[in-house]
Image: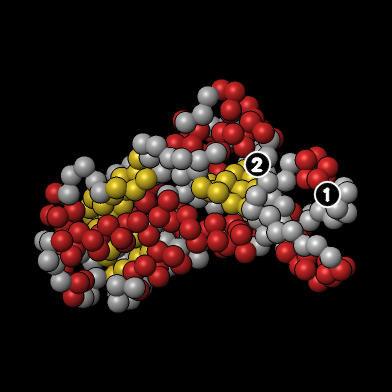
């Protein structure tokens, strides 16, 4: 908020580079500034954020940041599309009732699994008796939206925590289906196999770099007007950095990097980024809370 007289306000606007959209208040009502400047007391007021996740998943994240006073804009570095070949998943859909467990590691896994299930005219009731595992509350909710009960959600929202949960069960000879991204970490299927389980890993979707995306990110990066860049998966980190040249990489050193969890953090650090914020709860809500805590310091 800027306050001036009719004689000075033009100079102030020029100096501060004020651009539309703006709200101008003239007259005695300006004296009520202490009432009208509530927005400036929001925890992330004055901070500019870059959201790098897929366009279809970014809206709620941006909205949550804006509710807290931030300016947030999308620079999508990931696009989620069907796998190159549906046949591995299709074969598994034909024998759904033969599985002892079905594991979902992401909302996208649920989305594309259910999409293909409908396209193949398969009945969700074939999952009767199949134990359902989900990593994270968002993934759990996506499964519940299909009217399917989730049996196990690990305390920590990473594969390692799910392994601990499943490891408490007798899985020797048990058969599991894992529909996931075409490229993903192998620790979950490999460890379960070591425990004696049979795991069918099938690609349900793949992530790619968007062909083009209109954004003023590079302009803002050059201006130094970005405060925080957020990453919600390892693929967002990889694709984001692959888009930038060496000069742009160096400019990232002045920006706070926030990652949703330790796996994403490790990917970012391996690519040379200094990660400042990682929440204890690996969700978007947890990430925003950690960001708020950081700026309270």
| Residue 70 in the image, given as x and y percentages of width and height | 65, 55
Q: Which of 251 and 234 is in front in this view?
A: 251
Q: Residue at x 54, y 57 (%)?
A: 62
Q: In which quarter of the image is the N terminus?
A: bottom right
Q: Quadrant of the C terminus?
A: bottom right
Question: Residue 212 vs residue 215: left or right?
Answer: left
**Is residue 92 in view from this perspective?**
yes
**Is residue 236 in view from this perspective?**
no
Q: Residue at x 42, y 51 (%)?
A: 55
| Residue 175 in the image, given as x and y percentages of width and height | 22, 60
Question: Residue 239 vs residue 7: left or right?
Answer: left
Confirm or deny contact between disc 2 and disc 1 (CB under 8 A).
no
In the picture of the structure, the residue carrying the numbered disc 2 is 226
Question: Residue 178 vs residue 296: left or right?
Answer: left
Q: Which of 122 and 28 is in front in this view?
A: 28
In the picture, the disc for residue 153 is none
C-alpha distance separating marks 2 and 1: 26 Å
Q: Which residue is drawn at 35% across and 40% down?
A: 208
Question: Residue 250 vs residue 133: left or right?
Answer: right
Q: How many marks?
A: 2
Task: Report crowding for label 2: few under 14, some 14 to 19, many 20 or more residues within 10 A (C-alpha).
Answer: many
Task: Report crowding for label 1: few under 14, some 14 to 19, many 20 or more residues within 10 A (C-alpha).
Answer: few
Earlier along the polypeptide chain: callout 2 or callout 1? 1
In the picture of the structure, the residue carrying the numbered disc 1 is 9
| Residue 58 in the image, given as x and y percentages of width and height | 47, 55
Up/down of 228 relative to 42, above or below: above
Q: Which of 197 and 96 is in front in this view?
A: 96
| Residue 275 in the image, given as x and y percentages of width and height | 63, 42
Which quadrant of the view contains residue 109? bottom left
Residue occupying the far top of the picture? 246
């Amino acid at each position: 908020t800027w306050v001036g007289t009719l004689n000075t306000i033009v100079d102030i606007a020029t100096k501060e580079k004020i651009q539309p959209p703006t709200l101008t208040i003239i007259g005695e009502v300006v004296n009520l500034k202490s009432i009208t400047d509530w927005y400036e007391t929001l925890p992330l007021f004055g901070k500019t954020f870059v959201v790098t996740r897929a366009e279809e998943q970014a809206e709620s994240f941006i909205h949550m940041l804006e509710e807290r006073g931030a300016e947030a804009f999308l620079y999508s570095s990931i696009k989620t599309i069907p796998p190159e070949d549906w046949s591995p998943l299709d074969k598994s859909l034909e024998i759904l009732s033969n599985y002892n467990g079905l594991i979902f590691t992401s909302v996208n896994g649920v989305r594309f699994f259910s999409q293909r299930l409908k396209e193949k005219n398969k009945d969700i009731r074939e999952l009767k008796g199949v134990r359902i595992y989900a990593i994270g509350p968002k993934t759990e909710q996506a499964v519940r939206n299909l009217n399917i009960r989730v049996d196990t959600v690990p305390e920590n929202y990473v594969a390692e925590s799910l392994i601990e949960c499943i490891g408490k069960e007798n899985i020797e000879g048990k058969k599991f289906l894992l529909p996931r991204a075409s490229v993903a970490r192998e620790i979950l299927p490999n460890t379960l196999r070591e425990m004696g389980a049979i795991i069918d890993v099938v690609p349900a979707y793949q992530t790619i770099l968007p062909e083009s995306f209109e954004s003023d990110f590079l302009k803002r990066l050059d201006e130094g007007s970005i405060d925080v860049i957020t990453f919600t998966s390892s693929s967002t980190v990889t694709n984001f950095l692959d888009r930038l040249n060496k000069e742009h990489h160096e400019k990232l050193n002045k920006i706070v990097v926030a990652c949703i969890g330790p796996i994403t953090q490790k990917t970012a650090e391996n690519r040379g980024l200094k990660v400042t914020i990682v929440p204890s709860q690996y969700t978007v809500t947890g990430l925003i809370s950690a960001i708020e805590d950081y700026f309270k310091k």
